[in-house]
Image (cartoon, grey):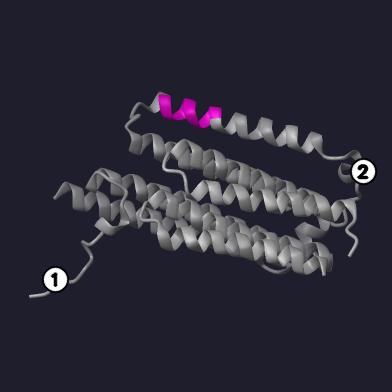
Amino acid sequence: MTLDIATIIDIILLVGACVSAVFSIFPKRYPRAIFAFTITNLLIVLFCIHRLALIIGFILLWVYAGAIVAFSVAIMNIAGATEAAGRIKGGIIVLIIFLIITVLLVMSLPPETLAAPVEITFRDFAHALWGTHAFIAILLSLLVFTIIASALMIVVFTLRSK
Amino acid sequence: MTLNIYIGLALTLLAIGLYGLISSKDMLKILISIEIAILASIILIVLFASISGVPYAHVLGLLVLFVSAAETAMSAALAILLNRETGSIDVSKLKELREETS
């Protein structure tokens, strides 16, 4: 079985993601777990970008940057850092580190990988988004999420006020 | 043959996520495990999207992403509330919804 260079890069990225996923579950300290989880996400984002799913890759990058900031804020809240300035500062630092590492990793990819032609244009993507009513589904899911989150908040505040 | 390697690696990631989900009682670790399992599904969606070349599969990947983002934000908020109410994020302490037996 002969593997081309692109497949080998994919496999290295996925094996790296599996290894860092193991390290994100087992450590007892949160910062190590979050660091390993960040690396897992970065490797998956790179896999998506490498597989020419550029749109998904970049949206994934921002969604997981947001998720890691949410995790960091949660950990800082639970660990006792209650000052808002500290939370925001920590979140922004994590986000900046996340983006710098991603840019460095993307730059380290071979030029022929980055220069590969994009098979799906943004126009195709937008047509598919509208054609499959996925846009409406996303809006509805966000609406349902907002309603559930609001209901939960009302329930929690009501229970706490009693 | 190459496809089998990709699927095997995605299933490995799914297995790691499921193991973390079952073995951990820490809510944040459970959340990370769920995210890892979702990442495995995203890998497979992106893989099959790149093989088929149709944009619909990319849209499906986008939907999974949005669900994942919503789930993360909500679960992190629940973890914070759990910590405020009980003083820890051990899910085994969540017994208040259990029906009382006489």
Q: Most prominent secondary structure in the magenta stretch?
A: helix
Question: Amino acid under label 1?
Answer: Glu
Please name the amino acid that badge 2 sits on: Glu
Q: Position of residue A97 (x, y in %)?
A: 61, 30
- What residue is shown at x 14% (from left), y 71% (from top)? B100
Tell me where residue A95 appears, x and y as whole percent: 58, 33
Camera sees residue B88: yes
Which segment is the magenta one? A86-93
- Residue in the foreground of this view, choosing between B10 and A143: B10
Which residue is at the far front? A1
Image quadrant in which the N terminus of chain A is located: bottom right
Judge left or right: residue A99 versus residue A24.
Answer: right
- Per the image, label 2 sits on a secondary structure element best described as helix
- A2 lies left or right of B5: right
Q: Are marks 2 and 1 in contact (CB under 8 Å)?
A: no
Where is residue B54 shown, x and y percent of the image? 81, 66
**Dot label at residue A135:** none
Which residue is tagged 1? B100
Name the residue at 28% across, 58% down. Answer: B92
Neighbor class of circle 1 (other Cα within 10 Å; few <14, some 14-19, many 20+) is few
The magenta stretch spans residue B40? no
Viewer-closest of A89 and A97: A97
Number of numbered markers: 2
Residue B51 position by quadrant: bottom right
Outermost residue on the left side: it is: B102
What label does residue A112 carry, if any? 2
Q: Position of residue A26 (x, y in %)?
A: 47, 49
| Labels 2 and 1 share a subunit | no
Above-or-below relation of A86 to A11:
above
